Amino acid sequence: MEQKRTPVARLMTSGVHTVTADETVADAATRLLEQGVGSLVVVDGDDQPVGMFTTTDLAEFAADTAAGDDVTVSKYMTERVVTISVRDSLSDAAARMLGNGIHHLPVTDDDGVVGMLSTMDLTAHFSYTGGSDMV
């Protein structure tokens, strides 16, 4: 009997936190702190993902002694966005994260970004289920 694999939609965090590329890094940092998250999806005017802004990007900004207060997210964001569909499996998500060396994976449906999946989510799920639904 084939084992049923858990879809990403079941584990993702809904209510994605976003930022636009023209907002300041200071505003993005405030949003990260206020929301208690490690990443923001950078979206365009149509709410489509165009980048990611993470705590790693924030650290790069902090280390850049030439950066001013008005520097925008676009200078530090990661432009290559790797996403996964709500219909894909957790196993697919884990493979995509490992293959791309990333910790946050925006989850999409036909309308755009609808959630976020992190390595922490996968780790918690795996520790609870033993990973039996990820094979």
Image (cartoon, rainbow, N blue to C red):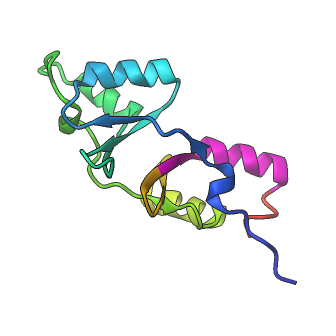
Percent of width and height locating residue 99: 47, 63
Residue 122 painted magenta: yes
- Residue 49 position, x and y percent, is 33, 51
Relative height, residue 57 to residue 65 (above, below): below
In the image, 24 versus 128, the foreground residue is: 24
The residue sitting at 44% across, 35% down in the picture is 17
- x, y percent for residue 71: 15, 25
Q: Residue at x 62, y 41 (%)?
A: 120
Q: Quadrant of the C terminus?
A: bottom right
Question: For residue 9, which quarter of the picture?
Answer: bottom right
Residue 64 in the magenta stretch? The answer is no
Q: Is residue 118 above or below residue 83?
A: above
Q: Is residue 44 visible?
A: yes
Q: Main secondary structure of the magenta part?
A: helix
| Number of numbered callouts drawn | 0
In the displayed structure, does residue 61 sit left or right of residue 103? left
Q: Position of residue 65 (x, y in %)?
A: 17, 19
Q: In this rendered view, identify the residue nearer to me: 109 or 96.
A: 109
Q: Which residues are magenta?
A: 114-130
Q: Residue furthest bottom?
A: 1
Horizontally, residue 37 falls left or right of residue 19, namely right
